Amino acid sequence: MATSRNEPASSSTIIMSKLTDISAFLRSYLASDEVKEASPRITLEMTNTIERRQLVAKILSTLFGVGVSFALTYIAVKWMTNAMDPTGKEKKKAQQRAREMLKRLGVTNVNLTDYELCIASNLVDPVAMKTVWDEIGGLEEVVESIKETVIFPFRRADLFSTSSLIQAPKGVLLYGPPGCGKTMIARATAKAAGARFINLQISSLVDKWYGESQKRAEAVFTLALKLQPVIIFIDEIDSFLRSRSSSDHEATAMIKTQFMSFWDGLITDPSCKVMIIGATNRPEDVDAAILRRMPCMFKIGMPGRQQRSEILSIILANEEIADIDYPLLGEKTEGFSGSDLKEACRIAAINTVHEFIQKGKSQYGNQYMDRMTGRIRNLTMADVEYGVDKVRESKRTIKDSISMMQLD
Ligand SMILES: Nc1ncnc2c1ncn2[C@@H]1O[C@H](COP(=O)(O)OP(=O)(O)OP(=O)(O)O)[C@@H](O)[C@H]1O
């Protein structure tokens, strides 16, 4: 049914006409210059956003890939290095030992590199640093001289700050036959000087990787400087720093050269409290350049008769003894070093224990360990003489074997 012109329009007709208007407006708007100009920009922005997201995703995935491959390479290289380096575990153990030692020494606020930690495993436990001057017999003159020329300027550097001539030596050489007290003196010196003691084992400098040994040689000095006051003790210094020769391995020669240059660093720094004490039985084999760096040299010779009596009385001071004729023992021990005397006393003491056990065995058979009572008798002159004879015998055997080997 048709609607008359005057009839009011229905709501659906109105909506339809409005929609037609809106659509016409949109069509004309989209066709306008304004929209034509804006549309590429909008399209570009949208494209840029999408591309940027894709780029970021790509970068992230690349980074992730690189990270993973780095981690895998690191693990593989580490595994291979560990597999190829059988000393790796030892190094770790040495570092662990060093950490424990540093704790005992009360060193807590010092950062150490891995190389320094390896060297720190050579630090001597202060509890083991018992050696005091009273325990060293027959070397009063040397000891007095060390006190004056080494320990006093080391401890009282403040008194010598203005003088370039009087300073604590940065190198000291103790030389003489084996077993006569060089190590004891070095330890007692460190104790009296109030210094930490690094008993440098040359094996801890050796690493089969090229360049590592040099780094460890450097670490000896950097560690000492961090922990000063420090005394670095090198026993048998001749075997490490012997006269350089053309037959030296290149790496060995480099370690020596480097060692000397770091040593020079100590010498030129008057305020540093680091000293190297070397000990040797063969001073003639020590490199001349090293000897120059050790201006203080002390001969620790074989003890004489009087000195041997003194050493024996020190060694037996804390033992239960009966009748000991020290002057006579001094006479009977011609050619004995301090360590020979100690060995003779050890054998003497073991002799009394052996006798005690024999008595127990005859009384209780195999049950002697649990059933024996009483006490081990005091050490007598006869025991020590027995020990002296045994040591002399073994010295003779060693001497014979050496001459036989030389003949061969
Ligand atoms: N003068 C001494 N007084 C007391 N004991 C001594 C003396 N000399 C040596 N001894 C005894 O001998 C042991 C070994 O001495 P020490 O290690 O100091 O000798 P060394 O000269 O360093 O020997 P080496 O050259 O073989 O290293 C000491 O632990 C100590 O028991």
Image: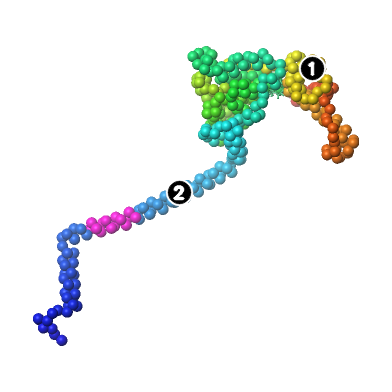
Identify which amino acid the numbered label 2 is placed on: Gly
Q: Which image quadrant for residue 24? A: bottom left
Residue 5, image x, y percentages: 9, 81
Residue in the foreground of this view, choosing between 372 and 254? 372
Q: Which residues are magenta?
A: 40-53
- Callout 1–callout 2 Cβ contact below 8 Å: no
Question: Is residue 394 visible to us here?
Answer: no
Residue 73, image x, y percentages: 50, 47
Residue 242, image x, y percentages: 61, 23
Residue in the foreground of this view, choosing between 362 and 270? 362
153 vs 34: above or below: above
Residue 47 is inside the magenta segment: yes
Quadrant holding the N terminus: bottom left
Q: Under tag 1, what secondary structure?
A: helix
Quadrant holding the C terminus: top right
Residue 326: image tag: 1
Residue 67: image tag: 2
Identify which amino acid the numbered label 1 is placed on: Tyr
Q: Under tag 2, what secondary structure?
A: helix
Residue 270 is inside the magenta segment: no
Q: Give neighbour class at mark 1: few <14, some 14-19, many 20+ (Cα, 10 Å).
A: some
* In-image side of 222 versus 277 (left or right): left
- Mark 1 vs ligand 1: CB under 8 Å? no
State ligand 1's quadrant: top right
Mark closest to the chain's N terminus, 1 or 2? 2
